[in-house]
Amino acid sequence: MTLSVDRPLLYPDSDGQPMADNTRQFQWIVLIKENLEWIFADDPQVFIAGDLLWYPIQGDPKTRVAPDVLVVFGRPKGDRGSYKQWEEDNIAPQVVFEILSPGNTLQEMLKKQQFYDRHGVEEYYIYNPDGHDLAGLQRIDGTLTAIEAVEDWTSPRLGIRFAFTPENLTLYRPDGERFLTTIELATARQAERERADTAEAQLQTERQRAERLAAQLRALGVEPEE
């Protein structure tokens, strides 16, 4: 008699595909992902990832996709091997980005669009840095629909603005500052730390000055006011 053993389904953390096919594609993926991390750094309930496999259906490990960048509102930050939607309060990523490379085919991108449409993505942005082409889709009446004026579009979910010219695509944060490269972000963080250190040093100096003044007043028999 042969006993059947129910083995747990495997949901691989990798699809065997590279994150990017060239340096330009990789730079754009990093630019978008890191700046979104910066924008939502203080919100613990916004999860952002790059090239992370998303499994929308429990029990179906073949239905999956790895967006170049995905954003999920309502899920905590933290490390994940993949995004299993049923373990995430069944919340689908609301915003996804795809950065095209020469290896991407029209059929592949149509399949991704159908996947995102079927599984609840609200905003889908596609950028081809080689052809300098930008496209965006927004969910309207339950269907992902092309955004006609994407060249000067502000994302309803992210608050970021796409400024598109014949020569360049520039993304702007909600505070009006443009997206920064990794080096520029590191420099900005260092400048913020230095400003904080300077402010703390000034505060400490003021405290010490106030303490010296209070001691001098007490020596004269005057009790300083609190």
Image (cartoon, helix red, strand yellow):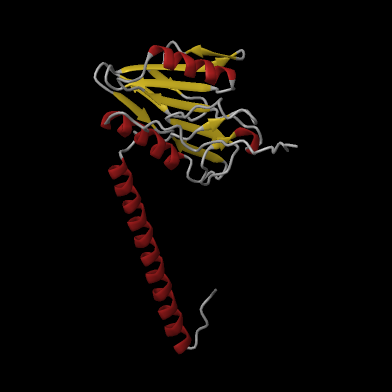
> Of 42 and 16, which appears nearest the observer?
16
Query: Could you tell me which residue is drawn at 53 percent across and 19 percent down?
Result: 115
> Is 7 in front, or is 223?
7
Quarter of the figure with the C terminus:
bottom right
* 124 w.r.t. 5: above or below: above
Of the 4 image quadrants, the one containing the N terminus is top right
Where residue 21 sits in the image (x, y, percent)?
Answer: 31, 28
* Residue at 43% from the left image edge and 16% from the top image edge: 109
Q: Pinpoint residue 221: horizontal percent, then vertical percent.
A: 49, 88
Tell which residue pokes out farthest to the right in this image: 1
Q: Which residue is drawn at 48% across and 86% down?
A: 218
Judged from this view, the residue extending furthest toward the left is: 167
Residue 157: x, y in percent?
A: 52, 28
Q: In which quarter of the image is residue 59?
A: top right
In this view, 49 is above or below 92: below
- Does the rendering let one see residue 177? no
Query: 172 and 93: which one is in front?
Result: 93
Relative placement, left or right, of 209 versus 52 is: left
Left or right: 142 in relation to 169: right
Q: Is residue 31 left or right of residue 49?
A: left
